[in-house]
Amino acid sequence: MEEYTIPKHHYKKIEANSTSLKIPTTYDIIIYKFDHEFLIKHKKRRNLDTNSTERLRIEKENRQFLEKYYKVCELITYWYGYYLYQGIGGPEDKDKASELYKEAADEGIAGAQLRYAFSLIKNNTINDIQTFITYLNQSAENGNSIAQYNLGDIYFFGKLNMPIDKEKGKRLLISAAKNKNTKAIELCKKENINLDQINWDDSVTSRNSLIGQSK
């Protein structure tokens, strides 16, 4: 997955002139470390052998950072949930991860909305389909192409006992395809859904749309 940076609105502008200097707050420093240290190391670890000493060190350091600061920002909350769910840098804790996904999801983080929805699947069974659909829909509305694809697939074919809604399914699949979701593009072609209106040069894969592909 291609990592994404913290949204600009989480930053506080620091200005300096001849008469005043605004000192960075602890919050500013944590956010800077997240954006310029944690995410860079997370991306670096993907290019290292799974059991290499350097990768294991990075994973442990990153997890310690997340454990210490996950309450500071909803995006850090999301990433701590991801590390717990995947067992990166320490043991898995899927129940705690699901709680953290929900916290971040309720603050509008599209990737967390997607992952919270899928964390509701236990033993290939969704016990609360309505909640699953609700959070998947929130993620899709926030531009996550993985959510758009899955929701489009559900509505187009009437999966999970949902009423078939071809038009809604098509709109979602086209949105996912525009965000360069490979599965959506393949399904659109298979079902003869017209993608001619998409200007592929202008289509942008949002950072949120890639979250489900983290490694």
Image: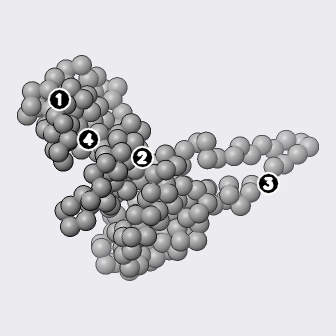
Callout 3 crowding tier (Cα within 10 Å): few <14, some 14–19, many ≥20? few
| Residue beneath the point at 36% across and 75% down | 92
Callout 4 crowding tier (Cα within 10 Å): few <14, some 14–19, many ≥20? many
Callout 1 crowding tier (Cα within 10 Å): few <14, some 14–19, many ≥20? some
Secondary structure state at the residue bearing disc 2: helix
Q: Which mark is residue 166?
A: 1
113, above or below 8, in the image: below
**In the displayed structure image, the side of residue 127 where residue 89 appears, left or right:** right
Q: Identify the amino acid type marked 4.
A: Leu
For discs 2 and 3, the disc positioned in front in the rendered view: 2
Instruction: Give the labeled residue for mark 4.
Output: 151
For discs 3 and 1, the disc positioned in front in the rendered view: 1
Q: Quadrant of residue 46?
A: bottom left
Secondary structure state at the residue bearing disc 4: helix
Q: Quadrant of residue 82?
A: bottom left
Callout 2 crowding tier (Cα within 10 Å): few <14, some 14–19, many ≥20? many
For discs 4 and 2, the disc positioned in front in the rendered view: 4
Give the mark nearer the N terminus: 3 vs 4: 3
Q: CA distance from mark 1 to mark 4?
A: 12 Å
Secondary structure state at the residue bearing disc 1: helix
| Residue beneath the point at 48% across and 72% down | 63
Instruction: Give the labeled residue for mark 2.
Output: 110
171, above or below 80, in the image: above
| Residue beneath the point at 61% across and 60% down | 72
